[in-house]
Amino acid sequence: MGTHYKGTSKEKLALNTFIKLIRSGDSLSSSLNLILAKYSLTASQFNVLDALYHLGNLTQKEIGKILLKSGGNITMVIDNLEKRGLVERRKGKKDRRTFTIHLTIDGRTKIKSVLPGIVNFIQDEMNILTSKEQLEMQKMCKAIGLKKN
């Protein structure tokens, strides 16, 4: 369903495109959340574990910047992961006021068990598009969402 906004054709085109983009993202997020729930993870928790697994130890500030999340949100996510024994905070070696976040053995085991299913889900969802369309979509999403960064 498109917009019922009574504006110019250019305004309606932009609104309809935006609505379709948001709805498709919401649909994918809902499906992803159902898969992650089977592993007792939220999307934010998965993203933190994934970042640490692929990028190594990071500060909370670095994690927030990578995931485009506020400091308060990242603190809560890391607190919850730490309570579950999936990550641990360690004081920085150079600056003892900072903490780096590390995957624990359980955290590494968890992300290794979750990742294949997530990759399969994403691949299945993206297979509706050709490789060329996927590359074009990447360019379009970067142009829209990351233009300020």
Image (cartoon, rainbow, N blue to C red):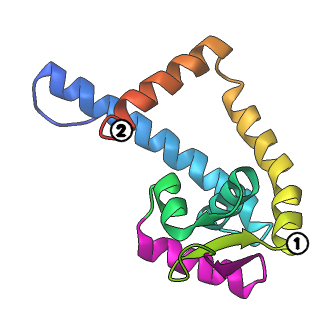
**Residue 75 x/y as whole percent:** 52, 78
- As drawn, which residue projects farthest toward the front? 94
- Specify whether residue 1 is in view: no
Q: Quadrant of residue 44?
A: bottom right
Residue type, mark 1 in image: Ile
Q: Residues within 10 Å of mark 1 (few under 14, many from 20)?
A: few
Quarter of the image containing the C terminus?
A: top left
Q: Quadrant of residue 48?
A: bottom right
Of residue 23 and residue 130, the one placed in the foreground of this image is 130
Residue type, mark 2 in image: Ile
Q: Residues within 10 Å of mark 2 (few under 14, many from 20)?
A: some
Instruction: Tell me if 66 is positioned left or right of 13 in this view.
Output: right
Element type at marker 2? helix
The residue at 61%/75% (across/down) is 92
The relative height of residue 50 versus residue 89 in the rendered view (above or below) is: above
Stretch of the chain drawn in magenta? 70-92
Q: Are marks 2 and 1 in contact (CB under 8 Å)?
A: no
* Residue 127, disc: none
Residue 116 within the magenta-colored segment of the rendering: no
Of residue 146 and residue 114, the one placed in the foreground of this image is 146
Residue 82 within the magenta-colored segment of the rendering: yes
Quarter of the image containing the N terminus?
A: top left
**Residue 65 x/y as whole percent:** 46, 56
- Specify whether residue 27 is in view: yes
The residue at 43%/77% (across/down) is 72
- Between disc 2 and disc 1, the foreground one is 1
The residue at 51%/23% (across/down) is 137
Q: Which residue is mark 1?
A: 105
**Residue 61 x/y as whole percent:** 48, 66
Q: Which residue is mark 2?
A: 19
Element type at marker 1? helix
Of residue 19 and residue 87, the one placed in the foreground of this image is 87
